[in-house]
Image (cartoon, grey):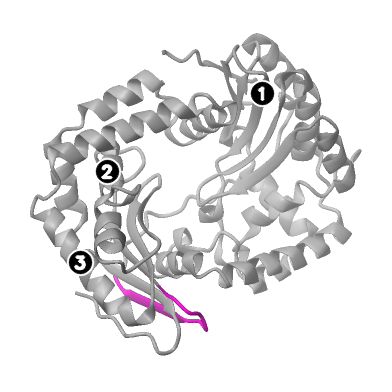
């Protein structure tokens, strides 16, 4: 099962990683940039995400319509996403169309013109996206929680930005930020599928090896402080959306798989502890789950439940009671064994997708500086003991550190921090 990764560095510092998968007919090609909303000043909120949008809006030889039509003509997909610490632009195509997909995405990345007329239209589009996010309370509750917990840090900035900053962007601002943050040494190109690595590196180098920027040095964010608090937002909606959060561990922690197994046991799947208690036994929520966000220097473990306002206080108390039971040791060896199988199955099933392999390689190499093979990951999962998970629960689920966020109607009950 050992993975056959091929890694090389172009003359300008861009890293290229390839994984041949001879039994598929697809190729996934991604450009990963170590830049996200965390690299923005307050006056720049949302600019990383906005640049991601603008790279689809035209180059020196293609209009935005040309980009869309040429990808559709080969039956391929081109897309992108922005996170807190990185941005990814990617294509998925049949292996016979890889050259075309490479040409299109390389052109978008290297030759975008940020046309003024498209910029103005895209500002309106992103403002609509911000409004849409405001109307999605399940997302909004996590947004207000992160803003409150990481207050004073760029880690708390919303990825979309806010309306005033998005409205202020112009071509010079976008080009300046791009030049300052899209340095070759901040870029990993990841390719997985029915490919020959040497040939892919040669083709990629033909487009990217001459890429240079002369912008300022990227912002180095300070290590954020976790600020415990109760954060609420009133919206005219039917449900109350509850999120609880605890400080976590960074992505490079040797205990990351302890954390991953704890997350799986508590709230990942229909048999998880909180799903069984809150939904199946008490019938309080349709949706209840846990989530772990890991960053280069910190992390956040969070719990979500969407409930009727009259059940908000009871649900809050029930979750806290279940966390107290977890801290008292009610996670069993059977819980751990089952979670291990879930994680290993998820990993192995993802290996059937060229996109999943490309994503895992690109993200790992960009953020961690190395790629763990599937065998190594399975070994790390298997090495986690029952005692490791109990210890992680006691370390993370400290109720005096718990933050609470709620989005709901004006008549929802007012919760209190423990």
Decide which of tag 3 and tag 1 comes sooner along the chain. 1
Label 3 – label 2 distance at C-alpha? 19 Å
Residue 234 part of the magenta segment: yes
Q: Is residue 134 above or below residue 156?
A: below
Q: Position of residue 232 (x, y in %)?
A: 40, 79
Total numbered labels = 3
Q: What kind of element bears circle 3? A: helix
Crowdedness near tag 3: few (<14), some (14–19) or many (≥20) residues, C-alpha within 10 Å: some
Decide which of tag 2 and tag 1 comes sooner along the chain. 1
Q: Position of residue 269 (x, y in %)?
A: 35, 47
Q: Which residue is mark 1?
A: 27
Q: Is residue 383 above or below residue 1?
A: below
Between residue 189 and residue 177, name the one nearer to us: 189
Q: Position of residue 300 (x, y in %)?
A: 34, 55
Label 2 – label 1 distance at C-alpha? 32 Å
Q: What kind of element bears circle 2? A: helix
Q: Residue at x 34, y 50 (%)?
A: 298
Q: Nearer the viewer, mark 3 or mark 2?
A: 3
Q: Is residue 71 above or below residue 235?
A: above
Within the image, what quadrant is residue 171 found in?
A: bottom right
Q: Residue at x 42, y 13 (%)?
A: 2
Q: Quadrant of the N terminus?
A: top left
| In the displayed structure image, the side of residue 398 where residue 355 appears, left or right | right
- Look at the image and give the residue range highlighted in magenta: 228-240
């Amino acid at each position: 099962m050992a993975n056959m990764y091929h890694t090389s560095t172009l003359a300008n510092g861009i890293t290229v990683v390839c994984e041949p998968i001879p039994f598929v007919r697809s190729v996934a090609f991604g450009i990963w940039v170590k830049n996200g909303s965390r690299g923005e000043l307050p006056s720049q909120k949302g600019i990383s995400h906005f640049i991601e949008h603008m790279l689809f809006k035209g180059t020196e030889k293609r209009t935005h319509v040309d980009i869309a039509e040429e990808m559709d003509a080969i039956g391929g997909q081109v897309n992108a996403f922005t996170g807190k610490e990185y941005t990814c632009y990617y294509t998925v195509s049949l292996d016979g169309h890889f050259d075309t997909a490479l040409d299109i995405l390389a052109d978008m990345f290297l030759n975008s013109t940020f046309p003024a007329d498209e910029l103005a239209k895209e500002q309106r589009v992103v403002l609509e996206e911000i409004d849409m996010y405001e109307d999605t309370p399940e997302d909004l509750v996590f947004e207000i929680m992160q803003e409150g917990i990481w207050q004073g840090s760029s880690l708390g900035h919303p990825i979309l930005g806010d309306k005033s900053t998005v409205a202020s962007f112009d071509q010079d601002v976008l080009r300046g930020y791009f030049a300052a943050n899209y340095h070759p040494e901040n870029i990993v190109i990841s390719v997985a599928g029915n490919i020959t690595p040497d040939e892919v590196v040669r083709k990629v180098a033909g487009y990217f090896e001459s890429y240079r920027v002369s912008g300022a040095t990227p912002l180095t964010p300070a290590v954020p402080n976790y600020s415990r608090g109760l954060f609420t937002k009133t919206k005219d909606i039917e449900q109350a959306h509850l999120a609880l959060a605890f400080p976590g561990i960074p992505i490079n922690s040797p205990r990351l798989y302890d954390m991953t197994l704890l997350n799986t046991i508590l709230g990942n799947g229909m048999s998880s502890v909180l799903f069984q208690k809150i939904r199946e036994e008490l019938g309080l929520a349709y949706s209840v789950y846990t989530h772990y966000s890991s960053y280069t220097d910190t992390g956040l473990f969070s719990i979500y439940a969407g409930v009727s306002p009259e059940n908000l206080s009871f649900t809050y108390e029930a979750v806290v009671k279940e966390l107290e039971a977890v801290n008292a040791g009610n996670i069993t060896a059977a819980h751990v064994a089952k979670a291990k199988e879930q994680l290993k199955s998820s990993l192995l099933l993802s290996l059937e997708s060229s996109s999943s392999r490309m994503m895992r390689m690109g993200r790992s190499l960009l953020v961690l500086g190395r790629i763990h093979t599937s065998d190594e990951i399975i070994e790390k999962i298997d090495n986690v003991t029952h005692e490791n998970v109990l210890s992680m629960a006691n370390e993370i689920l400290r109720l005096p550190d718990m933050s609470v966020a709620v989005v709901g109607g004006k008549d929802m009950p007012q919760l209190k921090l423990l």
